[in-house]
Amino acid sequence: MSEIDIPESHPRYESLLTRHRIEAGVEKGITSKQGLIAQGRGEAFDYLLGEETTPSAKRAERAAAAQLLLAEKPVLSVNGNVAALVPGEMVELADATDADIEVNLFNRTRKRMVAIADHLQEHGATEVKGLAADARIPGLDHERAKVDEDGIYAADVVLVPLEDGDRAQALAEMGTSEIVIDLNPRSRSTQHATVPIVDNIIRAIPNITEHARELADSGHEQLEQCLKEFDAADALDNAEQTIRQGDLS
Ligand code: PTJ
């Protein structure tokens, strides 16, 4: 039995586990109520994708691992949904790629920032950035602009999960490369990503970590090649085609 007392053999196990984690996140003051709506939106896309990682998303996850390993200063951005769904998995990915973790919220309050940082620390994070907020992403007039100067502001690669917003565009304009995880291939974030991953974050993060561990001893050239072979436009097109042909049975 799992944390929600549902056998793993249950046909909707993953979906029920995800819902439970988001609900618990709201109760713990980590996830915003809007996060529940965002989750529902994601679930609809996931349903049409067959609730599994497509071959195209698998390639994107490998490219993402290569990009994180190639980065000089990679940062994993965490919002209220990400913290509720994959806290331990984000810490593992940060360890595997030597990345920093930074909390960045749309509905930013000091209380939520601290609750999320504590939650990540309970799951093994040693340092969580985001509370200093001593720099701003230019061109954004909402709370997501607030970043740490030695974190997202200085990063060359940022992992941006579950946010359909203008921060992705603003970061791209700063010259930052982005790996975006979003089940909507038409979201603004995926459109600006160097590596868009159209997959459920529950599956995507452990997959990227596995690839990162596998690629850890690869040379610079091999990692570059892995990234070069990946075509972002093709990946988005592929995801959209799969969704459009989605089977509702
Ligand atoms: O914690 P905060 O204050 O920063 O707010 C976070 C939310 C998620 C509420 C905020 O960023 C928001 O409203 O996001 P959107 O505009 O609803 O975008 C979220 C995107 O994530 C949508 O395109 C969803 O399809 C997608 N999504 C939702 N759940 C998942 C997902 N993608 C991958 N895996 C999921 N589990």
Image: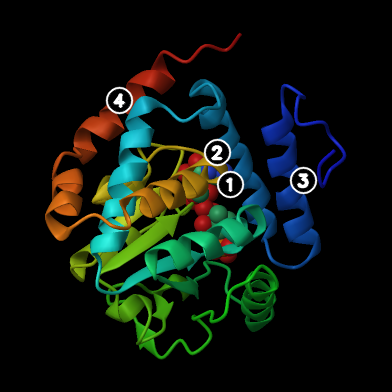
Kindly indicate whether the residue at mark 1 contacts the one at mark 2 (C-beta within 8 angstroms).
Answer: yes
In the image shown, does 214 or 238 lie closer to the viewer? 214
Instruction: Determine the CA span between mark 2 and mark 1.
Output: 6 Å
Sequence-earlier tag: 4 or 2? 2
Sequence-earlier tag: 1 or 3? 3
- Which residue appears at 53% of the width and 21% of the height? 50
Q: Residues within 10 Å of mark 2 (few under 14, many from 20)?
A: some
**Residue 91 place in picture, x, y as percent:** 54, 65
Q: Which residue is labeled 3 in the image? A: 20
Secondary structure state at the residue bearing disc 2:
helix
- Residue 41 is drawn in which quadrant? top right
Could you tell whether 145 is left or right of 8 in the image?
left
Could you tell whether 73 is left or right of 199 in the image?
left
Res. 169 visible in picture:
no
Is 83 rendered above or below residue 137? above
- Residue 239 is drawn in which quadrant? top left
Instruction: Determine the CA span between mark 3 and mark 4.
Output: 30 Å
Name the quarter where the N terminus is drawn.
Answer: top right
Amino acid type of disc 3? His
Q: Residues within 10 Å of mark 1 (few under 14, many from 20)?
A: some
Instruction: Determine the CA span between mark 1 and mark 3.
Output: 14 Å
Does the beta carbon at disc 1 come under 8 Å from ligand 1? yes
Sequence-earlier tag: 3 or 2? 3
Instruction: Determine the CA span between mark 4 and mark 2.
Output: 17 Å
Q: Which mark is residue 238?
A: 4
Amino acid type of disc 1? Ala
In the image shown, does 150 or 67 lie closer to the viewer? 67
In the image shown, does 215 or 164 lie closer to the viewer? 215
Q: Which residue is labeled 1 in the image? A: 38
Q: Which residue is labeled 2 in the image? A: 42
Instruction: Determine the CA span between mark 3 and mark 2.
Output: 15 Å
Instruction: Determine the CA span between mark 1 and mark 4.
Output: 23 Å
